Image: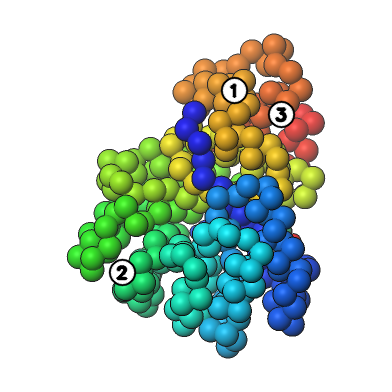
């Protein structure tokens, strides 16, 4: 299977140690996290400061410079604060990803204009003034709309990374199925565009010890439908292995299940059994509960 580009998720303001370090402008914990992710061979790093309403325009360039002092990687600047985005891009040694630009009318033009002017790529989050898309077709309509408008403003499809929006398994598995179905349509709607998603969203709210099983299994499913890159936990070595094209037996098993062939559960080893059970939860075939691996 094709290799997946990994964007490390771990530099984020939600982190119990890094959030306070960002606030206090304490560079060492941030440098250390940048170095540790680079050691794990992520391809890019996401820099997530959340809304950062007041101090964003000063915080993000400081973070970018701090990170660049520790690791030489392309960055994905993750904020809805467009003033912070502008200042952050200005500090970047190489063109970053703008994470993200949605179809919400208040933000779309500012984001695309910034990408065109600065040479940054942009992540197209398929979210509109009407909120979350309901199914694969609504995502497809949003994408046509996005590419049409972005193209008119001078941003080619090759500079856009399409995000189908991954939602938590506990909310609605129909959304996960829609996300997979939509991914397979991107190549036709937007040839040359890349795809990306926030993988760990799928396990939000799930006990920490169980989250990796949902993340890993959904990643194999997304890659089966052609996903090109994902924002992932840099420290989950199984995710790294899957991204590099490993775990052939798991990839084959999950792929067959997605094509509608039920596995002979008795013939599976322990790891394969956990993946197979998790596929069933993610497709909605089994009901989600915190004990899905034990049943
Ligand atoms: N699409 C795009 N960007 C995104 C997302 C997306 N950025 C944010 C998010 N979703 C992807 N990044 C994360 C980062 C951390 C977690 C989930 C998604 C996470 N962290 C743990 C937690 O909150 O419990 C641990 C926090 C810590 O201590 O580091 O779950 O969908 N374009």
Judge depth for marks 1 and 3 and give the one in front: 1
Residue linked to disc 2? 116
Residue toward you, 114 or 259: 114
Image location of residue 61, percent across then percent down: 56, 78
**Please, is residue 55 above or below residue 19 in the view?**
below
The disc placed on residue 248 is 1
Q: Position of residue 133 (x, y in %)?
A: 41, 56
Label 1's element? helix
Residue pictured at 51% horizontal, 40% vertical: 4
Side of 276 where 172 appears, left or right: left
Q: Which mark is residue 274?
A: 3
CA gap, disc 1 to disc 3?
Answer: 15 Å
Disc 2 or disc 3, which is closer to the eye? 2
Identify the element where label 3 is drawn. Answer: helix
- The answer to whether the residues at label 1 and label 2 have Cβ atoms under 8 Å apart is no
Mark sitting earlier along the chain (2/3): 2
């Amino acid at each position: 299977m094709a290799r997946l580009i990994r964007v490390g998720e771990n530099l984020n303001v939600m982190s119990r140690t890094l959030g306070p370090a960002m606030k206090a402008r304490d560079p060492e914990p941030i440098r250390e996290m940048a170095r540790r992710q680079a050691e794990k061979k992520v391809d890019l790093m996401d820099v997530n400061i959340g809304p950062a309403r007041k101090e964003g325009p000063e915080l993000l360039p400081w973070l970018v410079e701090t990170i660049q002092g520790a690791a030489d990687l392309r960055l994905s600047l993750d904020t809805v604060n467009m003033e912070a985005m502008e200042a952050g891009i200005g500090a970047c040694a190489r063109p970053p990803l703008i994470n993200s630009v949605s179809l919400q009318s208040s933000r779309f033009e500012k984001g695309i204009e910034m990408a065109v002017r600065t040479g940054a790529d942009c992540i197209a989050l398929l979210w509109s003034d009407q909120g979350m898309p309901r199914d694969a077709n609504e995502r497809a309509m949003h994408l046509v709309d996005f590419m049409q408008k972005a193209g008119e403003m001078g941003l080619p499809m090759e500079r856009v990374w399409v995000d189908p929006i991954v939602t938590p398994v506990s909310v609605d598995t129909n959304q996960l199925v829609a996300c997979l179905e939509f991914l397979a349509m991107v190549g036709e709607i937007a040839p040359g565009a890349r795809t990306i998603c926030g993988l760990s969203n799928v396990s939000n709210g799930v006990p920490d010890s169980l989250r990796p099983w949902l993340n890993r299994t959904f990643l194999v499913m997304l890659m089966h439908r052609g996903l090109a890159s994902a924002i992932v936990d840099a420290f989950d070595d199984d995710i790294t292995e899957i991204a590099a094209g490993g775990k052939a037996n798991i990839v084959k098993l999950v792929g067959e299940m997605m094509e509608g062939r039920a596995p002979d559960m008795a013939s599976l080893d322990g790891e394969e059994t956990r993946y197979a059970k998790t596929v069933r939860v993610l497709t909605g075939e089994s009901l989600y509960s915190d004990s899905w691996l034990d049943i």
